Amino acid sequence: MVAVQYFASVREAMGREGEQLELPAGVNTVAELMQFLAGQDADFASLEQGANPLLVAVNQTVVDATAAVEDGDEVAFFPPMTGG
């Protein structure tokens, strides 16, 4: 089971704070998880294909799309950070 969390505008777009899901066979990286989620939810697909890439953290560490995802992990999606 993987805990998927959505924060800030990502949470608003998804309409929920997160979800628990069984890690599908063949999903071993952040990129593969994002592809799976996009295939399951049009709202996530819109976010993933947007002009600004989502930030991702696995177990509270910001990672890139090549990072491993394993059963028991927490994966969090954030909007891009902006400075000011």
Image: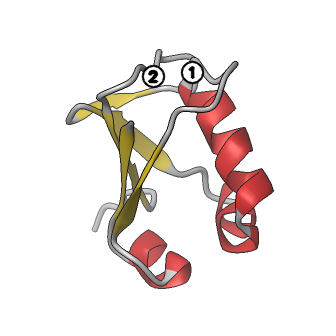
Mark 2 Cα-neighbour bin, 10 Å: few <14, some 14–19, many ≥20 = many
Q: Is residue 36 above or below residue 48?
A: above
Please name whichever residue, 19 or 38, is drawn nearer the observer in this view of the structure. 19
The image quadrant that residue 24 belongs to is: top right
Q: Which residue is mark 1?
A: 29
Instruction: Say which quarter of the image contains residue 38.
Output: bottom right
Q: Residue at x 41, y 74 (%)?
A: 11
Left or right: 45, with 70 as reference point: right
Within 10 Å of disc 1 (Cα), the crowding (few <14, some 14-19, many 20+) is some
Q: Earlier in the sequence, mark 2 or mark 1?
A: 1
Please identify the residue farthest to the left as the structure is shown: 60
Quarter residue 2 falls in: top left
Q: Which residue is mark 2?
A: 69
| Helix, strand or loop status at disc 2 | loop
The front one of 17 and 23 is 23
Real-space Cα distance between discs 2 and 1?
Answer: 5 Å
Name the residue nearer the viewer: 51 or 9. Answer: 9
Q: Position of residue 52 (x, y in %)?
A: 62, 58
Q: Residue at x 70, y 66 (%)?
A: 41
In this image, 74 relative to 67: left or right? Answer: left
Amino acid type at image mark 1: Thr
The residue sitting at 48% across, 84% down in the picture is 15
